[in-house]
Image: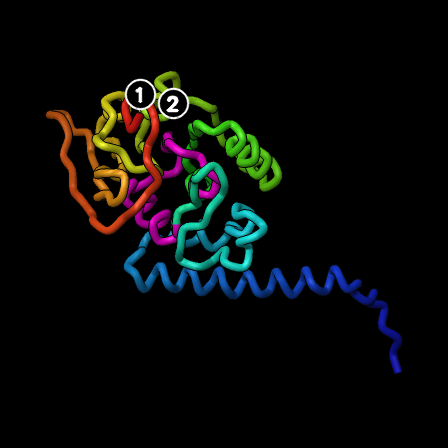
Amino acid sequence: MAKSDATPLSPGESTQRRSVKRFDMERDEMIQLLQERGIRDERLLGAMGSIDRHEFVQEAFVNRSYDDSALPIGKSQTISQPYTVAFMTEALSLHPGDRVLEIGTGSGYQAAILARMGAKVFTIERHMDLLVEARKRFDRLGFTIASKCSDGTLGWKEFGPYAGILVTAGAPDAPEPLLDQLAPGGILVIPIGDQEVQTLYIITRTKDGYVSRQAAGFKFVPLIGKKGWK
């Protein structure tokens, strides 16, 4: 009988292998659900299928990483549900190399999706603790993403204009600084409403001003800042 040169797995390594396999299955199911709900952008689906969402959630919720639901990340903030991330990202109509500004870094998951799709990502978070943790994830996972702790309602004029601006918190209205920082043809995706329920506005800058379309049925944490909720 031939002798095997394989080294037996330690209990910890065995558990890790099983965990990765389980997450692979759950990630595939998440992508299938997104497709069933109407997401069609293949680059977006590929990006979401290649990024480990469980790296961006708190340990207490890791078993729910690929559920289509928002999860707490601390500071009364959440990581958006996968469908919301996919819908908002698809609405940006991104091209590789586009400059995109994200308002509300949170765990960093949305920024990672944008970066994986080839965008040059600039992201703002008002909670330094969350930003520090997001930066650690970016470094660990190999993402090059510019970030700062600031009032996101004022945007990041230094690196504009942007082909896309994505706001991951609910606003009372579209902040004027964000509209001003859109490039011609650029798209702002922002939830607008009260602090309980919002309508998602997809606003495109044209040569004559702005045009928008809407999608209902979304709920976000409030956008706090000088041009948002106080």
Magenta-drawn stretch contains 52: no
Location of mark 2 (residue) = 151
- The answer to whether marks 2 and 1 mark residues whose Cβ atoms lie closer than 8 Å is yes
The residue lying toward the viewer, choosing from 157 and 169, is: 169
- Residue 220 as seen in the image, left or right of residue 10: left
Give the alpha-carbon distance from disc 2 to disc 1, as whole Å: 7 Å
Helix or strand or loop: what does disc 2 sit on? loop
How far across and down, in percent of the image, does residue 190 sit?
A: 27, 37
Name the residue at 44% across, 29% down. Answer: 125
The residue lying toward the viewer, choosing from 119 and 19, is: 19
How far across and down, in percent of the image, does residue 152 sit?
A: 37, 26
Location of mark 1 (residue) = 226
- Residue 43 as seen in the image, left or right of residue 59: left
Residues in magenta, as a range? 81-109
What numbered label is drawn on residue 146? none
In the rendered image, which quarter contains the N terminus? Answer: bottom right
Name the residue at 18% across, 44% down. Answer: 214
The residue lying toward the viewer, choosing from 89 and 220, is: 220
Displayed quadrant of residue 135: top right
- Residue 69 as seen in the image, left or right of residue 215: right
